[in-house]
Amino acid sequence: MDSLTADAQELARRLLRLIPGVVELDWAANPAAIWQADFWGGRFVAHPDLDDIVLDDLLNIDDQKAELELNTRQFLSGAPANNVLLWGARGTGKSSLIHALVNAFRDDGLRLIEVNKSRLANLSEIVHRLREEPYKYILFCDDLSFEAEDASYKELKSALEGSMFKSSANILIYATSNRRHLMPEYMADNEQASFVQGELHQSEAVEEKISLSDRFGLWLSFYPFKQDAYIDVVKHWLNKLSSAHGVKVTWNDDIRGAALRWALARGVRSGRTAQHFARHWVGKQMVVE
């Protein structure tokens, strides 16, 4: 039955190509796409608003940037490379780093496909569609986490080290999350842990939840910025945005104090917070002037 369904979907896709206005995505012209599932199995839709950020815009995450850039270069060159989990504090550049890599390496054949968590069941279909394409693809799962009753994580878990990805050398998964282990852990899970002659034996429930993250070969950790690092990022975005809009902004104690209060009100010092403050400050100067 599964074979017949797959054959029917493939036949439907070929028929759809014959209908005016229904065409496959032009990967040469589109560096990024979103996977949309439908009755016929799904299709790639050009990404409407890929961030134009560049690697030099991402400050104070130099180690993470270097590791991910190296892994991506390995991937593009055909050398062994890892699926990657970027986890940590919100707004610290996890998603922006992946977008910046696509902007940096699009001319080298790198393409991005954003896959929503609810579409993970379509991973085998996505891999099948991309296997013969002449590009290298990052399947991007943003803000990935699962609830205890969510079974879709099993699709991702089997894909990360399953046969579908081993047979396709042009696809990697890059995922971002605020959780290192992607699944919630409860006190009841740990109550089943035991010590045997000084050795800790975790419960099967805990092992199951940790094992998903373990399937990612490379983990990159992101942390809230210290105050000086946050101020450096604020200065960067103020300079970039003021130059782009022809506004003169001279750094002083008033701007510094406003930037710190902005971060305090949001409860986090991060690159995202710094960029939002810079937009606010530059935009305000344009309206006042």
Image: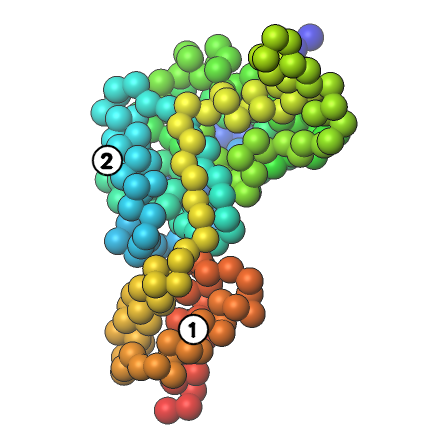
- Location of residue 78 by image quarter: top left
Residue 50 seen in the current view: no
Q: Amino acid at mark 2?
A: Asp
- Could you tell me which quadrant the N terminus lies in? top right
Q: Residue 157: image x %, image y %?
A: 56, 21
The picture quadrant where one finds residue 4 is top right
Q: Is residue 236 left or right of residue 24?
A: left
- The location of residue 21, given as percent across then percent down, is 50, 41
Q: Which residue is mark 1?
A: 259
Nearer the observer, 151 or 25: 151
Horizontal relation, residue 277 to residue 74: left or right: right
Left/right placement of residue 84 relative to residue 212 reads left
Q: Nearer the viewer, mark 1 or mark 2?
A: 1
**Residue in the foreground of this view, choosing between 234 and 100:** 234
Along the line of sight, which residue is nearer the eye, 86 or 23?
A: 86
Give the answer, above or below, for where 99 lies relative to 283: above
Residue to which mark 2 is pinned: 108
Residue type at mark 1 is: Ala
Is the residue 260 above or below the residue 111 in the image? below
Q: Please say if 182 is above or below 234.
A: above
Which residue is at 48% across, 39% downward? 87
Q: Is residue 169 visible?
A: yes
Residue 28 place in picture, x, y as percent: 31, 38
